[in-house]
Amino acid sequence: MRPILMNHKKLLDHFEIMTYNSSQDERKTMNVEKVIDFVEKVLKSRKKAIQTKSLDLSISVQTQLAQVLELIDAEKLKSLRILHVTNTEEIMPGNMKIPIDFEVSRNWSEFINLECLAVSNFVITSPFHLFHHVTDLFVAFRSIICADIYHVKYKLLKTKTDLYSNIFYEEFIDKSRLASILGPRRYIREMWDFEVPDTDDRL
């Protein structure tokens, strides 16, 4: 791995730090810590961030997220997938209660070209506005407000794309306002369909 990291110059399609084989959670955690420390040491020695379009990452604590993101060329990253080291299967975000705060990453604001974010084994404690630029979300938030969901609606309808976001939450502070803005729910579930309007006036 060292020669690849040291000599890497071109933009990669995909880069990942994941653990798959060990069945012991403690060993998985140790392995990921060692790999992240190794990658950090090599990349800092060459004084150049790794350029990749897509990043898959297994972490055990949120400080590792900040540690890795500081090694990535923020301008080039389009897709980021994060899972807890003890469970690398993509599951519904809301099933996990492990908190993660993106504000601990000093350079998160630099990832302005990020288009897709999937966080499967954590609940995000950061404010929603930090992710307004991301068009494709598969995440769970500790807390959201009506304005957050309205922003998602406006963004998706304005771009008129086929993107599909899943946003889960633990607390919806002003949930009662949602129906008045988005209309009735689909079926009996807490799901809303956004029809693409004919004109911007209907947004």
Image (cartoon, grey):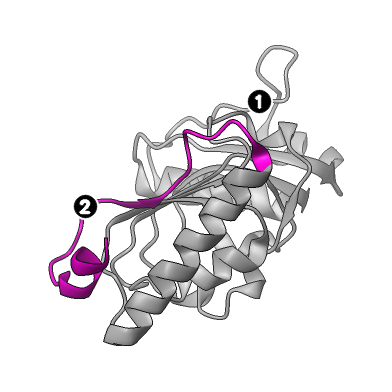
Q: Which residue is mark 1?
A: 191
Q: CA distance from mark 1 to mark 2?
A: 34 Å
Name the residue nearer the viewer: 113 or 203: 113
Which of pointers 1 and 2 indicates the residue nearer the eye?
Answer: 2
Residue shown at 36% from the left, 48% from the top: 159
Q: Picture coordinates of residue 65 (x, y %)?
A: 56, 64
Left or right of 88 on screen, residue 123: right
Residue 111 visible here: no
In the rendered image, the quadrant that contains the N terminus is: bottom left
Element marked by disc 2: loop
Does residue 172 appear in the picture of this structure? yes
Q: Is residue 108 above or below residue 140?
A: below
Q: Please name the residue shown 22% across and 74% down the image.
A: 6
Q: Nearer the viewer, residue 38 or 57?
A: 38
| Badge 2: residue crowd in 10 Å (few <14, some 14–19, many ≥20) | few
The quadrant where residue 71 appears: bottom left
| 110 left or right, relative to 12 | right
**Magenta region, residue range:** 1-25
